[in-house]
Amino acid sequence: MDRAIPDHSANLNSGTFVLSRSDYSVEARGTDRCYPSVQDAVDAVRVGRSVVGALPFDVADPAALVEPLELIRRQGPWQPSGTVVPLPSVHIGGQIPSSAVHVERVRALVDALRAGEAQKVVLARSLQLHADGPIPPLSLLDALVRADRLGNGFAVDLSAAGGDFLGKYLVGSSPELLVRRRGTTVTCHPFAGTAARSEDPRMDAEIAARLQASTKDQAEHRFVVEEIRAALEPLCAELDIPEWPQLSSTPQLWHLSTPITGVLRDEATTALEVALALHPTAAVAGVPRAAAMEAIARIEGKRGFYAGTVGWTDGAGNGEWMVAIRGLELAAGGLSAVATAGGGIVEASDPDAELAETTAKFRTILSALGL
């Protein structure tokens, strides 16, 4: 078998990839080929090869895509096949930037938006995490999947991207479907507009109702939906987009979300190609996309794989890609990690509320780590 693996392939481990969803899970084992070039990966799926892994936030950066030796699909959410190694104690080592600086960044960005720089920019901040012992990626994935009522979770070896990503993992529990392709049918389920949940049922219901009635959150969500419409219309002969978003929830958060369905014009268009047409959506970048990404690069710097996309495409072109949020980037060796969370900033944004939103979004990964 032809094994066109780059020079850094000797440093790769088994190329572990897992995507867990409510109705099924996909697990990839071994590495036949690496595709740090997105175009090479597209060419591969076009000729019937399977590709799994992660795209970075900025697709101009190296990707972590591989053709696995084995692609296994099972019914129901992912479950570990062996004994789960306990997670070590973890503590927060610092914030990037500090809470006060993030608030000031949001305030300055709101002023820039009002001056016409863009309509929406998603601004993120990070937490540095340190562990008393190695964090096993699949043990963390197991905790995340068990905590999510829909069984959402992902774990991706990032080594195929090379350089500083050798030995690193991306692990998380994303609620947001970028795209699923089954035959000529594609589905998306964007999330935008967020509120932290309450343990009190009455208060929780009130929070959900306020979110659904929020003019600011409805407008933020509409930006996302219209960007997806613009990306899908050239690819789809039919497109069904509800007029109003629905409420969706995770254990920690309420979201506004819109289920979108389309029928591809060309049955040869693969799941990976549709994902590339959509990514990054306005839910993680902003509107207009170019202006938002310029602002993000100026304010945050490189995001790496946070707010990228993780998923798989098989030899028939079918597959599923999730937005890479609610997780962390685990350092080689597992002794440290960086967790990142963001929020959509528009002219009506309140800086303190935006800080609180990112804090709420960190709860998914921090809870899994026992924090």
Image (spheres, helix red, strand yellow):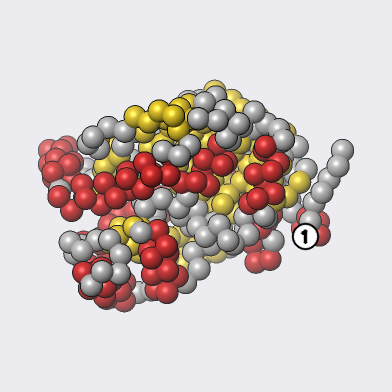
Q: Is residue 289 left or right of residue 37?
A: left
On the image, numbered disc 1 is attached to which residue? 8
Residue at image x 81%, y 59%? Answer: 7
Q: Quadrant of the N terminus?
A: top right
Q: Based on the displayed image, in which of its 4 quarters is residue 240 positioned? A: top left
Residue 81, located in which quarter of the rendered image? top right
Q: Using the image, determine if residue 336 lies above or below residue 313.
A: below
Q: Quadrant of residue 371?
A: bottom left
In the rendered image, residue 257, in percent from the top left (x then y), is placed at: 30, 39
Find residue 271 and report its horizontal and vertical position in percent: 55, 36
Is 171 above or below relative to 209? below
In the rendered image, residue 262, in percent from the top left (x then y), is placed at 42, 30
In the foreground, 11 or 348: 348
Q: Measuring 56% from the left and 52% from the top, which residue is drawn there?
A: 55
Query: Does 107 sit left or right of 231 as displayed?
Result: left
Name the residue type under label 1. Answer: His
**Relative to 253, 331 lies left or right:** right
Q: Answer above or below: position of 259 versus 32.
A: above
* One can see residue 276 in this view: yes
Which residue is farthest right?
1
Residue at 23% in and 45% down: 197
* Residue 93 visible somewhere in the drawing: no
175 or 233: nearer the viewer: 233
Residue drawn 58% across the image and 49% down it: 54
Of residues 58 and 289, the one drawn nearer to the viewer in this rendering: 289
Task: Give the x, y percent position of residue 152.
Answer: 45, 37
Crowd rating for badge 1 (residues with CA inside 10 Å; few <14, some 14–19, many 20+): some
- Indicate the secondary structure of the residue bearing disc 1: helix
Question: How many numbered marks does the figure carry?
Answer: 1
